[in-house]
Amino acid sequence: MGKLADKKPFYSILALAIGISGILILISTLLKDILLSWMLDTIENLEVISVLASILLFSLPAFFLGMVSPYAVKLKIKDVKTSGATAGYLYAISTAGSITGTFLAGFYLIPSFRISVILYIFTLVLLSISIGLFLIFKNSGNKSIN
């Protein structure tokens, strides 16, 4: 996805990737019970079901979320001389978010809510971010803005 960010560094594509991720998480959440029931009826090996279900439910959303970092770096770099600092800053924010998310999920969200509710909230957050990016940068003529 870094190659696409190099070819077309537009906020609209970043927003689209985030929005598609949200939609795919919503679809996975809605289809998980049907998929898991079918797999339990069809496949006898629980380990195979676990791996296959994880791949089917999470690979596409993860693929599109994987586009966010390269795009964010590409869009925020103003000068090659400061590209390392810019990338480091964005990855520091990403790492802090990952750590916060891990503790928030483990100590609050999972004990307090059903997983489906958490995934619906995550979908709502991603779609809100996507729409926000579209609205903020809609007048940029689809150009990258630093």
Image (cartoon, helix red, strand yellow):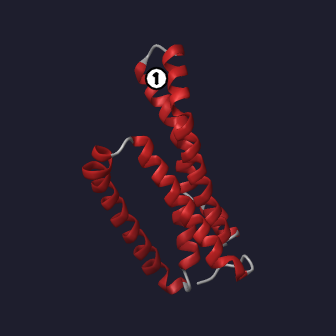
Q: Quadrant of residue 67?
A: bottom right
Location of residue 121 in the rendering, given as x and y in whole percent from the top left corner:
46, 53
Q: In the figure, is residue 96 to the left or right of 55?
A: left
Q: In the figure, is residue 120 to the left or right of 12?
A: left
Instruction: Give the vertical position of 80 relative to 18 (above or below).
Output: below
Residue at image position (33%, 66%) is 96
Residue at image position (52%, 56%) is 124
Instruction: Give the vertical position of 76 relative to 65 (above or below).
Output: below
**Residue position for label 1:** 48
Q: Quadrant of residue 104?
A: bottom left
Location of residue 81 in the rendering, given as x and y in whole percent from the top left corner:
50, 86
Q: Secondary structure at mark 1?
A: helix
Instruction: Give the vertical position of 71 relative to 77 (above or below).
Output: above
Under mark 1, the amino acid is Val
Between 24 and 60, the one lying in front of the other is 24
Q: Quadrant of the C terminus?
A: bottom right
